[in-house]
Amino acid sequence: MIYKIWKAAAVALGSGIGWIVGVFEPTFPLIVVMLCFIFYDAWTAYQLDRRVKKAYPEKAKRPARFTSFAFGKVVRKTIPERLVLILLAFMAEKWVFVHVSIPLSYIVTGAILFEQAWSSLENNSSCRSENESRFWRMLQRIMIDKTERHFDVTLDEMKEGGRVTDEQIESARQLLAEFERYKNGQKDEDTH
């Protein structure tokens, strides 16, 4: 009796897996390309980490390494989120927009690939010296410099050598003046 129940459960599970594979089979190439882009982005982040440690060894948080935490975040968070987006787009394409020819799964995958490619270019262009390729310097004009993510301080603080700038002093003076006005206003209200 127990054998028949296990056999029936195994057949049902196998049928379900076969149905899922059959239905979502057209998304497999999209998922493989997405995974390649995500893993390349993780690799470029590791290369950036190595460049940061080499350029600023005394200010870096930790030695350069391919951390399991960062890679674990990619595997636990980034990949499943992007995978669900592709599968949802495919389901909407096949079961909702039946009478309209919209390649929604390809559009969503293209957006994901663009995001990952942009992040990879940001990683590659960050923490480059002045005598490196003009291409990377040009990219830094339109992209975020991700170098400071590897430090406890911002790049502005490092560039200023940890000194307080004139703009910071002026900003602090303005805040103090506003606080004094507020405090004086509170005293006037208390006396009335």
Image: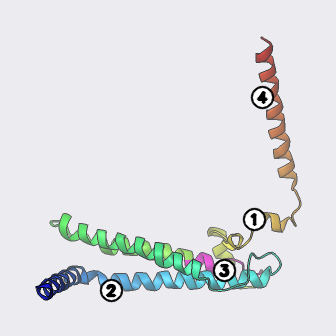
Does residue 114 appear anywhere in the picture? no
**In the image, residue 2 lies at what x, y percent?**
14, 85
Location of mark 3 (residue): 136
Earlier along the polypeptide chain: callout 2 or callout 3? 2
Separation of residues labelled 3 and 4 (CA atoms): 48 Å
Q: Position of residue 115 (x, y in %)?
A: 49, 72
The residue that disc 2 covers is 29
User: Label 3: few (<14), some or many (≥20) within 10 Å?
Assistant: some
Residue at 36% over, 69% down = 85
- Residue at the spot x=77%, y=66% of the render? 153
Dot 3 amino acid type: Trp
Stretch in magenta:
120-129
Task: Please name the residue that numbered disc 1 is placed on.
Answer: 154
- Of the image marks 3 and 4, the number of the one nearer the N terminus: 3
Task: Please provide percent x and percent y for residue 163.
Answer: 89, 61
- Residue type at mark 1? Thr
Mark 1 or mark 2, earlier in chain: 2
Of residue 75 and residue 165, the one placed in the foreground of this image is 75
Indicate left or right for 86 with 127 as reference: left
Specify the label residue 182 is tagged with: 4
